Image (cartoon, grey):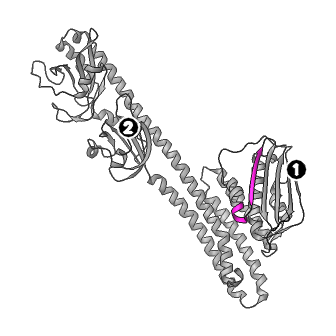
Amino acid sequence: MTRFYSLPVRLALLVGGTMLPLIIFAGAVTYANYLQDRREAEERVAQVTRGTRDAVEREMQGVLAGMVVLANSRSLAADEFEDFRHSADAFVQQFPGKPVISIGDAQGRHLFNSGIPAGQPLPPRVRRPERDLVYQTGKPTFSALFTGAVTGTQILIITVPVFRDGKVIYDLSFNPPLQLFQRIIEQQRPSEEWTVSVFDQAGVNFARLPNPESTIGKRASPSLYAVMFSAPQGRSATTSLEGVPLITGFAHSRMTGWIAAAGVAEATLTGPALKDMMIALSIGLIMLGIGLVFALRMAGQVARGETLHTLLINELNHRVKNTLATVQSMASQTFRNSADREAKQKFSSRLVALGTAHNLLSESKWAGADLRDTIEMVLVPFRSGQRVSVSGPELNIDARTVTILSMVIQELATNASKYGALAHADGRIMIHWERVEHSDPHVILRWVERDGPPVKEPLQTGFGSTLIREGFAAQLGGRATMTFEPDGLTCVLEFPLRRR
């Protein structure tokens, strides 16, 4: 019912219909880049998490090795605890702070403590489940974070068995300083936008950046705590103890039972994505506004008489073509620093196809165009000798079909030049169409590639394939099928023949 609209409304719809798809397409490209950046960030999070876990395990392996040497020392085998003190002191001096080596037996008696001078009485030793487990399994254990009875501070203990005649007679414990783990995560943290933590078996922080002074000894944030025990490792969107949204990964250590976690702030991804989106949207809206201003101005002038109608349409077409060229130039500037050069090239080629269709329709004042002329004009940049043949009866198609078909032919020709028949010196393309008369006349167009490189169906569906298979059918009420045969691609397009 367009004929009942006023001329200004029709011109505004024309400009909007030309520009809005470009704005939407630019937004879609920006969003696709954001999704790709997010996938890369999630993989980076997983790498940092595993790296933190592995660094802690390597450090603990070194500590265990030293403790095993102490457990097998001659002085300890002879119960010469004062002689053993020299070895224990040499071991603990490797670490910051004042860690201690302590020895007890299965009855819970405190036999030795490197932190208490020789000759002074030893305090009662608090029984710990990790120490009892050493006597049951004969294997080293790693504790959760707790408050030490002697030091009164939060500590972890590592306990190894002391064997004699194949039996565990003592347990040897060591409390590694928490500064040791803090140093590890400082080395693993990529930047200040990252939150890196190490948790005990109960999900309590004992090393963390940022804000270690206020978070060590606290349980993980509720969003992380809810998922960190669901699997040996994984990723999730969480919120830190400071209230910062994160993309977080976690990984359990089979050796210690402790849990490493690392997360990067969501803002590091959404900020640049929103900036790119706003740039693309601003460019599109400016161009849309320019087009609308010209359209409405010209519509006011045309109201004087029918003689100005042709002048108005020609001028509008000229302005839209300039707008398309401006959009292409500004889009090039916008994507200049993008790593995805192929996306930039595809975007430009699709603008060219849209401009080609616009030129063809301009000559007929948007009344439609000849099918052969439409195909020939799109294929001009891809023609090389007699490698492309075009045949079929004379048919006139409407403006919408011209626009959509131009985009589809451009996608097929671009793919053929990169991966198909035009990528090989002997390759050729046959394009043929026929009119089929039924209750509703329609056209069947076949695109056949031969003598090119072997082809196979791509594993991922890109924008071009989606445009051909889904967009073509949705816009024209027809259908499109693509067959990837060993000797070349065959694409069949079927669409109704509308009255112009």
In percent of the image, x 38 and y 32: which residue is there? 253
Q: Most extreme residue toward the bottom, as rendered?
A: 304
What is the CA distance from the residue labelled 2 to the residue labelled 1?
Answer: 61 Å
Horizontal side of residue 321 vs 260, given as left or right: right
The region drawn magenta spans: 472-486
Residue 239: percent from left, percent from top: 37, 51
The residue lying toward the viewer, choosing from 266 and 395, is 395
In front here: 94 or 490?
A: 490
Residue 71's label in the rendered image is none
Please tell me whether residue 101 is drawn above or below residue 405 in the rendered image. Answer: above
Q: Secondary structure at mark 1?
A: loop
Q: Give percent across and percent down for residue 479.
A: 74, 59
Residue 422 in the image: above or below residue 308:
above
Residue at the spot x=76%, y=42% of the render? Answer: 455
> Badge 2: how crowded within 10 Å, few (<14), some, or many (20+)?
many
Q: Earlier in the sequence, mark 2 or mark 1?
A: 2
Q: Is residue 341 left or right of residue 380?
A: left
Q: Which residue is mark 1?
A: 387
Measuring from the top left, give residue 481's x and y in whole percent: 75, 53
Residue 101 sits above or below residue 82 on the image: below
Q: Is residue 153 left or right of residue 442?
A: left
Quadrant in the rendering for residue 333: bottom right
Residue type at numbered disc 1: Arg
**Which residue position is annotated with label 2?**
260
Residue 481 within the segment the image draws in magenta: yes
- Residue 196 in which image quadrant: top left
